[in-house]
Image (cartoon, rainbow, N blue to C red):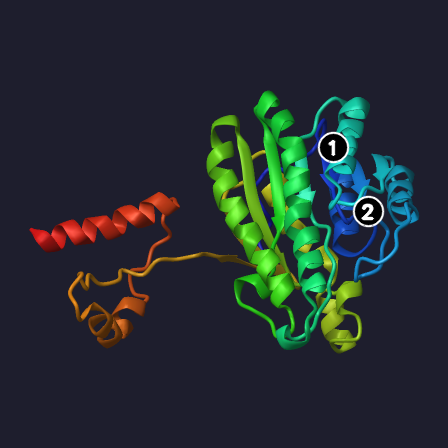
Amino acid sequence: MSSSTEPRIDFTGRVAIVTGAGGGLGRQHALALAARGAKVVVNDLGGAVDGQGGSASAAQKVVDEIRAAGGEAIANAASVTDFAAVQAMVQQAVDTWGRVDVLVNNAGILRDKSFAKMELDDFRLVVDVHLMGAVHCTKAVWPIMTAQKYGRIVMTTSSSGLYGNFGQSNYGAAKMALVGLMQTLSLEGAKNDIRVNCLAPTAATRMTEGLMPQEVLDALRPEAVVPAMLVMAAENAPTRTILCAGAGTFEAAHVTLTQGAYVGLGADAPEQLAARLAEVTERDGEQVPASGAAQGANEVGKAMAARR
């Protein structure tokens, strides 16, 4: 393995907020940011995997770890579902350190069941924590990042959202929604150097205990995901990127558009489309549109070309 010629990723002078940082992946994110110089707000409600209960002790333990290693951190036990509490958390960061540079939206819960057996309350709560939790935190830091013309926001998506997983319709829907949020915020934040990315981690945490053999769990240590977060939170971060990470391997996921085919508006357009579906779904030459408007322009362009 060749060593990197990239300069060390450094967060000295930066202030980071990590949600759900009392254990698992969030804890590793907080520790890594602090180890590289960031001042960190360790946020954790301290609840169970399903969102029940709450205690500040989980966040405080991580703060104690960071301080013992010579870093700076403060604990916060706000629920990301409570916008007023989230605003107070962001204000706490500003009052303590004067700015917020990095937000890692990591907080989440699971309420797994097949869709047929799932209660709507369990669907709603998972969407509320993952999607609205990220919205609340992002909304609270957005004016600060806009004013300082600098911000790095990492959304935590999932392969369950990108590709589906049995029993996780609620979780998958929320996780894919974060990709849509990232797509638009990266466009809106560009002029103020606010870069927004998504991390899709595969890691062994409280949420995956007992689901896999120990050898696999060892390979899927949460620490193995952290490099992707650091790259997406760094000064020279990309924007509008979905990085998948697990067991030391990293990939990028894309929402792509095929070349497609112009079928027209005739009465038999449905039958024409059905007959040419293989052509429409053919992936050779697919692209990643720069925006939703670019996809529309692609379709209008084909229609105009067909009329010439």
**Residue, x 84% and y 59% (percent of image)?**
48
Of the pair 218 and 203, the residue shown nearer to us:
203
The quarter holding residue 272 reads: bottom left
| Mark pair 2, 1: CA separation | 15 Å
Q: Nearer the viewer, mark 2 or mark 1?
A: 1
Labels 2 & 1 near each other (Cβ < 8 A) = no
Q: Quadrant of the N terminus?
A: bottom right
Q: Secondary structure at mark 1?
A: helix
Figure check: 307 above or below 137 = below
Q: Which mark is residue 87?
A: 1
**Residue, x 65% and y 75% (percent of image)?**
114
Which comes sooner in the sequence, label 2 or label 1?
A: 2
Of the pair 286 and 308, the residue shown nearer to us:
308
Which amino acid, by three-letter code, is at mark 2? Asp
Where residue 78 appears, as percent x and y from the top left, is 81, 41
Q: Is residue 37 visible?
A: no
Where residue 201 appears, as percent x and y from the top left, is 64, 59
